[in-house]
Image (cartoon, rainbow, N blue to C red):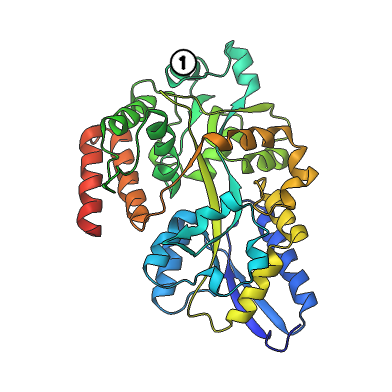
């Protein structure tokens, strides 16, 4: 250990599932074993509260040294001037170990504010027993999916689709599946927010119909966060859901007897899936930047990186790890790898957090029958523009 590496830092991390804590504690213990006298403090706020708690803590001068963040949050932090450009503090040899096209997702204003530490796309999980019993096969288009979802809904025993209607991904993931598949975009070429375009309205109309017209989702959609959504599938009460490959590990641990498959998300006028990276950021007011940087270097070494990413059922971002049989030999995980060419990423824009909040309110208003799709999206756009201009 270098003489300059001493003291302690605090890392905020995501507990993606039950094993996350044990894996992160193992990684920290290995680092502390190699560096006597160094302490890495771990904190993991609940996923749906993570963003707000982080912003509040940083604003109060009580934030962590390092934090895992949804990459979409990174632009907000960079725009606020509270995080560092990694290229100014970490060696080029570390940066060069990354898969370069994934590394781009951590860049904003030509600076590397985030180091993506895992990646994924999203796919549709199918309960094959429910499908076989209903005599249906996975739909390739959203039009066909309606019939399949209706055939596999037998409330209250089973629902055609477990739909997330609450929490941070209510809008960020779900609306984008439909928006992009119907040819829509978040911003136009001039940078104006256009989720209320005809494609956006078509997308939200379809989503609202799933809940209110076709009634193929679970009840109380607006109270269903990500854990609730996944619980519906792993309990055998949902014929399908859309999420990332972390559900593979959850199913193996919690529902090994449920037979399921993974298929591409149905298409509208085009095929689309959400590509996602989470990123590690370093805060400017860290009292021990040298230690934070060295721990980061350790975190991205192949054995440690492979352990963290494979434990989450995700896709690695380090070139060496990507060749590990733990990733290449998993057939279900391969579906997500194959979908990456069609993947689009959430926009790197400091308005994105506000867009997620207002967009989520729009979706909930439609699900609850309080507003029509056009009205709800128009209101969301107006609120975002008023608050960010």
Q: Position of residue 192 (x, y in %)?
A: 26, 47
Residue behind mark 1:
144
Q: Residue at x 78, y 58 (%)?
A: 303
- Residue 261 location, quadrant: top right
Q: Position of residue 316 (x, y in %)?
A: 67, 50
Q: Residue at x 55, y 51 (%)?
A: 277
Q: Nearer the viewer, residue 349 or 201?
A: 349
Left or right: 263, with 74 as reference point:
right
Q: Measured along the vertical axis of the image, is residue 311 above or below residue 33?
A: above
Left or right: 107, with 247 as reference point:
left
Left or right: 331, with 166 as reference point:
right
Q: Residue at x 49, y 72 (%)?
A: 84
Q: Measured along the vertical axis of the image, is residue 24 above or below residue 265?
A: below
- Residue 329 location, quadrant: top right
Q: Position of residue 305 (x, y in %)?
A: 71, 58
Quadrant where the image shows the N terminus: bottom right
Q: Residue furthest bottom?
A: 3
Q: Nearer the viewer, residue 63 or 336?
A: 336
Q: Nearer the viewer, residue 361 or 101?
A: 101
Q: Exactly how many numbered labels are in the figure?
A: 1
Q: Nearer the viewer, residue 37 or 229?
A: 37
Judged from the image, the secondary structure of the residue bearing numbered disc 1 is: helix
Q: Position of residue 185 (x, y in %)?
A: 35, 38
Dot 1, how many residues are within 10 Å of its Cα: few (below 14), some (14-19), or many (20+)? few
Q: Measured along the vertical axis of the image, is residue 316 above or below residue 374?
A: below
Quadrant where the image shows the C terminus: bottom left
Q: Residue furthest top?
A: 135
Q: Residue at x 60, y 17 (%)?
A: 131
């Amino acid at each position: 250990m270098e003489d300059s590496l001493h003291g302690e830092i605090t890392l905020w991390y995501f507990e993606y599932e039950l094993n996350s804590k044990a894996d992160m504690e193992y990684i920290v213990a290995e680092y502390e074993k190699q560096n006597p006298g160094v302490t890495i403090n771990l904190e993991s706020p609940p996923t749906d509260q993570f963003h707000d708690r982080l912003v509040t803590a940083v604003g109060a001068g009580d934030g962590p040294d390092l934090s895992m963040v949804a990459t979409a949050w990174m632009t907000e932090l960079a725009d606020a001037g509270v995080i560092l450009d990694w290229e100014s503090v970490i060696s080029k040899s570390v940066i060069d170990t990354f898969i370069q096209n994934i590394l781009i997702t951590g860049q904003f204003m030509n600076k590397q504010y985030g180091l993506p530490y895992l990646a994924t796309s999203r796919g549709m999980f199918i309960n094959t027993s429910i499908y076989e019993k209903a005599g249906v096969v996975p739909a390739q288009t959203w039009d066909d999916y309606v019939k399949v979802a209706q055939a596999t809904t037998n409330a209250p025993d089973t629902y055609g689709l477990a739909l997330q209607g609450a929490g941070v991904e209510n809008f960020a993931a779900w609306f984008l599946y439909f928006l992009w598949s119907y040819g829509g975009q978040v911003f136009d070429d001039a940078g104006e927010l256009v989720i209320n375009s005809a494609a956006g309205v078509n997308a939200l109309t379809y989503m609202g119909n799933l809940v209110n017209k076709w009634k193929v989702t679970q009840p109380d959609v607006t109270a269903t966060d990500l854990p609730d959504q996944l619980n519906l599938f792993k309990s055998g009460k949902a014929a399908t859901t859309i999420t990332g490959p972390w559900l593979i590990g959850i199913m193996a641990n919690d529902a090994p007897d449920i037979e399921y498959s993974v298929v591409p998300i149905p298409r509208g006028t085009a095929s689309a899936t959400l590509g996602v990276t989470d990123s590690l950021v370093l805060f400017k007011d860290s009292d021990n930047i040298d230690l934070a940087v060295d721990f980061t270097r350790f975190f991205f070494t192949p054995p440690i990186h492979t352990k963290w990413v494979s434990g989450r059922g995700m896709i690695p971002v380090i070139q060496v790890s990507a060749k590990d049989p733990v990733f290449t030999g998993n057939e279900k995980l391969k579906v997500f790898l194959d979908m990456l060419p069609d993947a689009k990423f959430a926009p790197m824009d400091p308005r994105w957090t506000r867009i997620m909040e207002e967009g989520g309110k729009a979706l909930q208003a439609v699900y609850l029958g309080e507003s029509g799709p056009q009205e709800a999206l128009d209101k969301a756009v107006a609120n975002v523009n008023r608050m960010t201009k």
